[in-house]
Image (cartoon, rainbow, N blue to C red):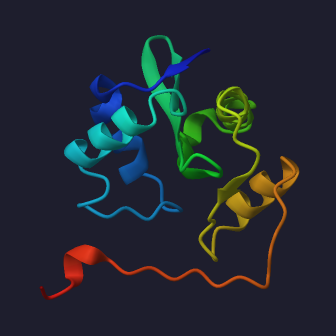
Amino acid sequence: MIIEKMKIEDYDEIHLIWSNTNELTLRAIDDSKESIERFLKRNPNNNFICRIDGNVIGGILCGHDGRKGFIYHTVVNENYRGRGIGGKLVENVINSLKEEKITKIGVLVNSGNLWGDDFWESLGFEYFNNLKYRILPLDKLNT
């Protein structure tokens, strides 16, 4: 198992895993190759993939705004789950954020993703039931 920084050259392999993971919500505009390339340029040290036998089998996207980190699209191919790979990916993200003096990190979990909810809780991520998540998709606005 090799964990390394994600590069745009890894996009096709990781996007295939994202697309085949039921618990993940993708948006074509946000998860396009061009969008992910911008994200990786903005956050070059906080995104990782895992390779086994040269193949990408998992990955994690993470960015920060200078004070708080946020994790997106943490995924491990179903055939490789239960081996600690997800935890290693999160560990790499946490270490990269600490190096950049970021002191807090968040993650959203789809409400029906019980497996994911258990995973994040096992890593010490606290649940806040007093928050509501709201978004405004700017591509949907009439301008």
Query: Residue 63: x percent and y percent?
Result: 52, 45
Q: Nearer the viewer, residue 16 or 37?
A: 37
Task: Tell me where residue 69 appears, x and y as whole percent.
Answer: 62, 49
Q: Is residue 83 left or right of residue 48?
A: right
In which quadrant of the rendered view does residue 89 lie? top right
- Residue at 58% x, 46% y is 66
**Residue in the foreground of this view, choosing between 14 and 80:** 14
Observer-nearest of 92 and 64? 64
Q: Position of residue 140 (x, y in %)?
A: 22, 82
Asked if residue 13 is positioned above or below residue 51 in the image, the reply reads: below
**Observer-nearest residue: 60 or 137?**
137
Residue 91, located in which quarter of the rendered image? top right
From this view, report whether residue 94 is shown above or below residue 32: above
Q: Vertical placement of 47 versus 114: above or below?
A: above
Residue at the left extreme?
143
Residue at left 29%, top 41%?
A: 38
Quadrant placement of the N terminus: top right
Side (left or right) of 122 relative to 115 = right
Whole-percent x and y of residue 78?
Answer: 56, 43
Quarter of the rendering containing residue 128: bottom right
Please state, as top left, top right, bottom left or bottom right, where the C terminus lies in the image. bottom left
Q: Left or right: 73 with respect to 41? A: right
